[in-house]
């Protein structure tokens, strides 16, 4: 399952570029391995940052924000640096995509044709916002001039996950820089390489020293140090709900820094009785199996109306059996390996629980091969709402198909979860779509589509799926303070 000679050369060049010119250097001299999910073999050892490294990064970010050229630049000048970075990202598309696939296991075609271009688009989007952030003039009940200033919040701490390393880098860094902040970013220990490469390109684009600081390391050490640091003004975290709780607690026990959280999900995908079954099967398949099922908003509870349930299950099985699983560098591969041994074991554990709980295993359920972390695309039917495979975030290629009778019933069942990140609705009836979009307690509802992540579309959750929004205009408020300025007016011509 090895990459060809062309990819091998590309990968070697990319790792040298990311590793030898990395902005993250551990003071203690420790390293940790980043592994190839296709084989479990070592890619490279990366500098392991800890609390001392985070403190050094925060001091650099604070100096850059308080004393450096970054806050004294015009918003247009900051915008130009972000646009130059986007151009460099686009120029190095293939190398970055190769790193993403090597480190994460996702299909190269997905990384090269979709995810890197999406990151480029997002940085250009936020570069466009940089010189359009402004306050308001506020009428007052008396002879006063009142205005609001929208000021950068300061040093932003950011902790990103392993399932979409480059895109999560973009979602966090883009709005923070557009608002004029400096950053300390902790990458996921499973996938540190593209963040290091992107940081190098930012410096090539002219970003001043200390504005963007990348620390590679583990969550309990480096991540916790970011969350509790007294000189970090704001934290943004994407990851599991359990870790999000810990981040929130550490932030509250330190300096009460504001926290935005994009957390887990157990998203319903509702296929109504009027659906075209073939189209619904394909979209539901994509909603769950995309990115090896390692997606926080995956449509992992597939609710299907009883009138089309049996036909849907049979066609979903056929689609699953035709899914191409293999080396993610090979053309046409739809599914690569899970990220690592821990995640592989977790997914296989849930498959075992599903079998034991009485759900019907329609297809899949086993490992593929003996090397790497490949799992067969798996479907369960006859799934009950209280089964673990229907309540827990599996984060793998396991689809649970659940039968329903009425619209009122499926609304109640879809909402009966601690999560509220996203939902999918598949129907030809606009009234049905309107009813469901307003009734589902989630941050995003995709109607007759799924996983549409344009730069301007906000993304975030209800309930225990998080607080705040990523992307679009809404994310700017995460990185801004609002200051009211009031001064008296002497003999004003008007009020």
Image (tube, grey):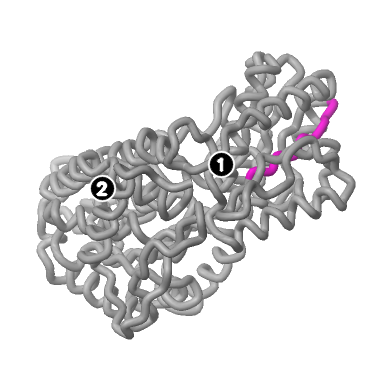
In the picture as drawn, the residue positioned furthest to the front comes out as 5
* Other residues around mark 2 within 10 Å, as few (<14) / some (14–19) / many (≥20): some
Q: Is residue 472 visible?
A: no
Cβ atoms under marks 2 and 1 closer than 8 Å = no
The question of residue 99 being in magenta is answered with no
User: What's drawn in magenta, residue-wise?
Assistant: 397-405
Q: How many marks?
A: 2
Helix, strand or loop: magenta stretch: strand
* Residue 96: x %, y % from top left: 30, 47
Q: Residue at x 11, y 48 (%)?
A: 77
Q: Nearer the viewer, residue 192 or 182?
A: 192
Image quadrant assignment for residue 89 = top left
- Left or right: 280 in relation to 64: right
* Secondary structure beneath label 1: loop
> On the image, which quarter does residue 216 sit in?
bottom left
Residue placed most toward the observer, 261 or 85:
85
The spot of residue 220 in percent (x, y) is 50, 75
Residue 451 lies, with reference to residue 214, above or below; the image says: above
The quarter of the rendered structure image containing the C terminus is top left
Which residue is pictured at 64% across the width and 43% down the height? 397
Q: As drawn, is 483 to the left or to the right of 396?
A: left
| Residue depicted at 39% across the width and 77% down the height | 229
- Between circles 2 and 1, the one closer to the viewer is 1
Q: Which residue occupies the foreground of this view, 437 or 398?
A: 398
Residue hosting label 2: 135
Residue 492 visible in rendering:
yes
Q: Position of residue 37 (x, y in %)?
A: 50, 55
Q: x and y percent of residue 491 in the render?
A: 13, 49
Give the CA separation, mark 2 to mark 1: 27 Å
Q: Residue at x 41, y 35 (%)?
A: 109
Indicate the secondary structure of the residue bearing disc 2: loop
Disc 1 target residue: 443
């Amino acid at each position: 399952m090895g990459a060809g000679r062309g990819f091998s050369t590309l990968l070697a060049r990319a790792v040298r570029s990311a590793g030898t010119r990395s902005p993250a250097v551990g003071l203690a001299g420790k390293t940790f391995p980043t592994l190839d999910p296709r084989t479990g073999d070592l890619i490279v050892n990366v500098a392991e940052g800890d609390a001392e490294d985070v403190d050094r990064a925060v001091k650099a970010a604070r100096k850059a924000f308080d004393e450096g050229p970054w806050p004294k630049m015009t918003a247009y000048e900051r915008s130009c640096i972000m646009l130059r970075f986007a151009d460099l990202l686009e120029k190095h598309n293939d190398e970055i995509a190769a790193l993403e696939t090597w480190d994460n296991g996702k299909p190269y075609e997905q990384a090269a044709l979709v995810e890197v271009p999406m990151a480029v688009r997002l940085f250009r989007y936020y570069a466009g916002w940089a010189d359009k952030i402004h306050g308001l003039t506020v009428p007052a009940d008396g002879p006063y001039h009142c205005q609001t200033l929208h000021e950068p919040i300061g040093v932003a701490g950011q902790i990103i996950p392993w399932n979409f390393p480059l895109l999560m880098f973009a979602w966090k860094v883009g709005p923070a820089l557009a608002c004029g902040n400096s950053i300390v970013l902790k990458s996921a220990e499973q996938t540190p390489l593209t963040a290091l490469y992107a940081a190098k390109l930012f410096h090539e684009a002219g970003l001043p020293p200390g504005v963007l600081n990348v620390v590679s390391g583990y969550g309990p050490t480096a991540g916790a140090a970011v969350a509790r640091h007294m000189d970090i003004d704001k934290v943004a975290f994407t990851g599991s709900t359990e870790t999000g709780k810990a981040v929130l607690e550490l932030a509250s026990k330190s300096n009460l820094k504001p926290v935005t959280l994009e957390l887990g999900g157990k998203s319903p995908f509702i296929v109504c009785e009027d659906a075209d079954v073939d189209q619904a099967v394909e979209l539901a398949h994509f909603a769950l199996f995309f990115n090896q099922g390692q997606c926080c908003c995956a449509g992992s509870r597939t609710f299907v109306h009883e009138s089309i349930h049996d036909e849907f299950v049979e066609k979903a099985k056929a689609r699953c059996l035709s899914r191409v699983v293999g080396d993610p560098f090979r053309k046409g591969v739809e599914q690569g390996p899970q990220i690592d041994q821990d995640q592989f074991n977790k997914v296989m554990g849930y498959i075992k629980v599903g079998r034991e709980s009485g759900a019907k295993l329609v297809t899949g359920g086993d490992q593929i091969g003996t090397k790497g972390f490949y799992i067969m695309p798996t479907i369960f039917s006859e799934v009950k709402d209280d089964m673990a495979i229907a309540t827990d975030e599996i984060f793998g290629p396991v689809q649970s198909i659940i039968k329903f009778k009425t619209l009122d019933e499926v609304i109640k069942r879809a909402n009966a979860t601690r999560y509220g990140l996203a939902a999918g609705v598949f129907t030809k009836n606009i009234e049905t779509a309107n009813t469901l979009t307003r009734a589902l307690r989630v941050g995003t509802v995709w109607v007759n589509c799924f996983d549409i992540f344009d730069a301007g579309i906000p993304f975030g959750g209800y309930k225990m799926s998080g607080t705040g929004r990523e992307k679009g205009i809404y994310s700017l408020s995460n990185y801004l303070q609002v200051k009211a300025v009031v001064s008296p007016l002497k003999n004003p011509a008007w009020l």
